[in-house]
Amino acid sequence: QVQLVESGGGLVQAGESLRLSCAASGSIYHISFMEWYRQAPGKQRELVAGVTSGGSKQYGDSVKGRFTISRDSAKNTAYLQMTSLKVEDTGVYYCRFVVRNIGTADTTYWGQGTQVTVSS
C-alpha cells in the first residue's frame, strides 16, 4: 500500500506565493507520473501540472508561467511552487501519483487534499 501526504496549503493574498509538497511512502518501486490537480467549489477537478519520471512537464493553461512542478525521485516527493497567486487559484489541491511495483500493474494513488485560499 502507498500513502500520499500533502502539505503547504494555506491562506494567502493575491500576488503571494505558496509551495505545496506531496510525499509518498510505502511499497514503491518507481513513480511514473507525479501530478497536481485542483478542485474549486462547484467545479470539476482539473489538472494543474504534471511531471514524468523522465522530467517532462505539462501545465494547465491557467497556471503556465506562474506555477512550477518539480520532483525529488529519491524522496518520492513532488512539489508545486505557486507564484503570483490569483483569487481564482483557490481550491483544494490534490496530488496524484502513478506507482509501479515489480510484478504488478501501475496503480494510481491520490493525496487527501490541501486547501489553498487566495484572498483579494
Image (spheres, rainbow, N blue to C red):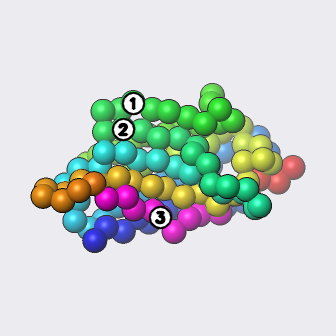
Q: Which residue does the image show at 31% across and 59% down from the upper left?
A: 107
Please tell me the numbered disc located at residue 111. Answer: 3
Nearer-N-terminus badge (3/2): 2
Alpha carbon separation for disc pair 1 and 2:
5 Å
Circles 3, 1 touching at the beta carbon (< 8 Å)? no
Alpha carbon separation for disc pair 3 and 2:
18 Å
Position of residue 94 measured from the top left corner of the image (x, y, whole percent): 54, 58
Position of residue 21 measured from the top left corner of the image (x, y, whole percent): 48, 54
Residue at disc 1, secondary structure: loop
Label the magenta part by its dominant secondary structure: strand
Camera-side residue: 62 or 74? 62
Q: Say left or right for 38 vs 78.
A: right
Q: Quadrant of residue 29?
A: bottom left
Q: Quadrant of the N terminus?
A: bottom left
Alpha carbon separation for disc pair 3 and 1:
22 Å
Q: Say left or right for 57 vs 25.
A: right
Name the residue beneath numbered marker 2.
52
What amino acid is at disc 1?
Answer: Ser
What amino acid is at disc 2?
Answer: Thr
Against 43, is 26 above or below?
below
Name the residue beneath numbered marker 1.
56
- Which stretch did the figure color magenta? 107-116
Which residue is situated farthest in the bottom direction here? Answer: 1
Which residue is situated farthest in the left direction here? Answer: 103
Position of residue 68 measured from the top left corner of the image (x, y, whole percent): 53, 36
Magenta residue check for 11: no
Q: Say left or right for 90 vs 64.
A: right
Q: Quadrant of residue 23?
A: bottom left
